[in-house]
Image: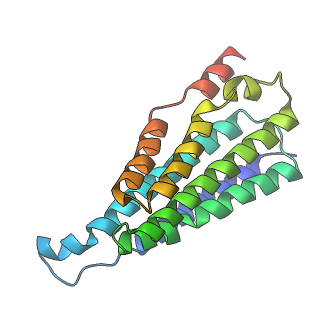
Amino acid sequence: MGKGRLEAFSDGVMAIIITIMVLEMKVPHGDNWESLRPLYPVFLSYVLSFIYIAIYWNNHHHLMHATHKINGKVMWANNHLLFWLSLMPFASGWMGENHFTALPTALFGVVLFMAGVAYYILEQSLLHLHGAQSTLAKAVGKDKKGQLSVLIYAIAIGLSFVKGEASLGLYTLVAIMWLIPDKRIEQALGEE
């Protein structure tokens, strides 16, 4: 089965997610800097969420670039990932509107955690389809960065009920980890 439709569908869904997030930011009624101050938490959660969607889009693109074929299992794994990413506007909006209080911040972490698990499932589905000796398998390796991310999300979820700022800091830390370009797939494709 070809992968083109899966890529196009995923790109479209992620573009819609970003559009929904920006539409959730309400325009202030005032015309001065002070009228923007209440929007700071909402804007901050938007920026963090935008970065996460961009990271997933980038990694998904690289993953699909190293993929030669897909099957039904891969398609469902991909939809599973898109489901969790589609909850990002709600979770980040709720977190920002409530100024990073415990439950909304924890829910944001649950969405990140589940998206990380879903990406791992997608990755494993593709690896199973392509085999242990494939370029994809060589590129992905053990995916320690992905596993570490999910662990940090789990810690941050629990921490959100103790110290919300620390939880938000951990979510930001994982985003920064992924902003550093991961060249594994590009290098593996170059060697092919």
Where's residue 177, x and y in %? Answer: 46, 37
Residue at x-position 59% and y-position 45%: 150
Q: Is residue 50 left or right of residue 63?
A: left
Furthest residue to the top?
A: 191
Percent from the top left, x then y, of residue 31? 14, 78
Q: Nearer the viewer, residue 159 or 59?
A: 159
Give the answer, above or below, for where 128 lies relative to 14: above
Residue 163 falls in image quadrant: bottom left
Q: Residue at x 85, y 36 (%)?
A: 128
When asked about the image quadrant of residue 187, the answer is: top right
The number of discs equals 0
Residue located 57% across and 60% down the image: 110
In the rendered image, the vertical position of residue 178 relative to residue 184, given as above or below:
below
Instruction: Examine the rendered structure and indicate whether residue 49 appears above or below residue 71.
Output: below
Residue 18 in sight in this render: yes
Q: Give the image location of residue 170, x and y in percent.
A: 42, 47
Q: Residue furthest front?
A: 162
Where does residue 4 sit, x and y in percent of width and height? 75, 48
Residue at 61% x, 31% y: name it.
144
Q: Nearer the viewer, residue 96 or 62?
A: 96
Quadrant location of the C terminus in the rendered image: top right
- What's the coloring here? rainbow
Residue 21 seen anywhere in this rendered image of the structure? no
